[in-house]
Image (cartoon, coloured by chain):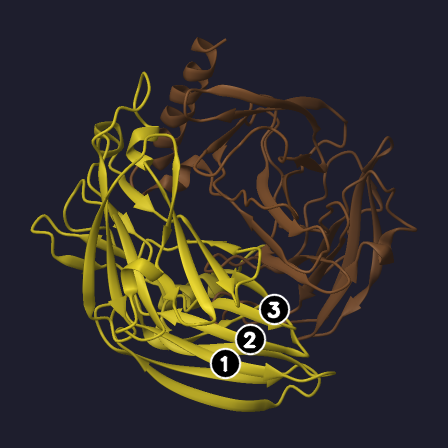
Amino acid sequence: MSYYPILKAPGVQGWTTLCNFAPNNWETTRCPTQLMNVTWPSADGWMTKNLGVLAPNAMRTITSNEVADVVPAEAVALLSLTISAPPSQSETLPELDTFRTMVPAWRATLGLSSEVAQASYQGEIDPFPPQGTLLTFGPFMQFGASIENFLILLNIEGSPKRRQSEVEVYNADGMTLMGRFEVRNNAANVIPLDGLGFGVGDLPAFICRGLTGIPLYFSRTTDGAHMSLEHTHPPGSLVVHGRRWEAQKMLKNVWFKRVASCR
Amino acid sequence: MQVSHLERIRRALWTLGQPLTRVPATPGMPVSDLFVWRHSNEWQTSFELIDIPGLFAEGGAGGGRCATIYCFDRSGRCFLQKRFELLPNRRHTVEMAGLVGRDHGEVGTFAVFHSETPAAVTAVGSYLAERGYVSYRYRNAPLRAYVHGNLDAISLGSDAQIELLGARGLFPREYRLQHEMKGVALYELGLVNPTSAEQRCAFQLVSTQTGKILEIQNVDLEPRGAVLIPYQIDESESARVIIKSKLVMARPLVFRIQDNKLGVFHG
């Protein structure tokens, strides 16, 4: 039941291109016209509005400006494609009546654009469990007088109730705490990474005990002429096959203990 | 949406005995993606080398671990094995230009094998995987564009022989890139062959406006090899790509160049 968020970052516009065709020809053969929807969290629950229909084999780009009249500026806009309409108001994030594929997952293009350049990745997001935690290592920082780096922590959960947590940023070598940042659920949390004291060769480690999400790294030149956007893997992706979730749990235990011993 | 019984049977024809990737033959051996390198006057490639086994070390990582980068040309021939000492809890940005040189073409693949698999990883039946982060710089731009690996494509056997883990299906199948290619831009689609047999791949460029196939390019891809397919998309043009092959998932790496500005992402 994947959603497709419209990303946010300083100085650029977010956009998402929805595709109404499957990513392969064997997991599903149906391709009817689908509804395009936008869903966002509010104090009254998850709100959903229809944005029109998407014909079979069509693609449609929706920008943050296009939903600005509907979705409050501080809320994350979640696009979806569905066969039947989701409820306009819901206490939990609506289950979507739509197609799902695995090899690969049905995705959209999630992008950020300046006046002169763009960066994107193929992505989707499913709700995270509220008890989830985050550990990831981000070797994406780039350095230079005119370069800015951001972490965008993207989270959605089933409940629209707003809650907060804290991301701790460490230098993995020596476990020096470089910064703490408040983050919240159901949001694209933007964390500036410049000025924390990282240098070339440092490996930033990001830890959050109160929520989890997709850690995106966005770098750009200040004139917007060049951009880079990519996410890091969860710890479970450092291994394959077997009981990899146990390996992920073990790795998190190791690093959460390291952090505790450094306090 | 519920999947019907008939649909499950139909899907089984495409999945039974046709996994996305195979489990390495030897327990405890390292696994890697098959990354794409580009090297020319216009292109530079870097890899972020991290001591992954050290991340699992209780009580902090000590030193002494290594990783070996294997470089292959576009035909899949291995022309270099270079060993690196790993820096615990640090990043080491490896400039691939220093490894691939000028004598092996402008594109190829590489794999990164760690010398050690933590006992705790082997104990849960898993394999250490390098699916890390590659960056590309185009025309000496001030910024590199990053993309992550995402396929457990290749492993080492106990005798240090290379084992390709990618699987092929019984029938040709389509990978439909869910991305709108819009002009004016140059797109270059990179594809690697993680299987042990040559693969014929047909790249179809389809007009979004008319649904018509604009062009078809057939390529034969050697094991461990790579290919780059260029598409110049003109102003007001909108297109998408379908890749037909027996690869279970022919997921391309997409380079997008607009006004000398680079974007890169996985399909």
Residue B144 coordinates in the image, percent (x, y): 53, 56
Label 2, label 1: how far apart the Cα atoms are: 6 Å
Residue depicted at x 11% and y 52%: B160
Chain letter belonging to callout 2:
B
Task: Tell me the kind of residue under disc 1.
Answer: Pro
Q: Earlier in the sequence, mark 3 or mark 1?
A: 3
User: What letter labels the chain drawn in brown?
Assistant: A
Q: Is residue A59 left or right of residue B196?
A: right
- Dot 1: what SS? strand
Residue depicted at x 25% and y 66%: B72
Please name the residue that numbered disc 2 is placed on: B187
- Residue B247, placed above or below residue B129: below
Give me the disc on residue B230: 1
User: What letter labels the chain drawn in yellow?
Assistant: B
- Closest to the observer: B135 or B13? B135
Task: Tell me the kind of residue under disc 2.
Answer: Tyr
Residue B240 position by quadrant: bottom right
Query: CB under 8 Å between callouts 2 and 1?
Result: yes
Q: Residues within 10 Å of mark 2 (few under 14, many from 20)?
A: many
Please name the residue that numbered disc 3 is placed on: B179
- Residue B145, placed above or below residue B219: above
Q: Earlier in the sequence, mark 2 or mark 1?
A: 2
Label 3, label 1: how far apart the Cα atoms are: 15 Å
Q: Residues within 10 Å of mark 1 (few under 14, many from 20)?
A: some
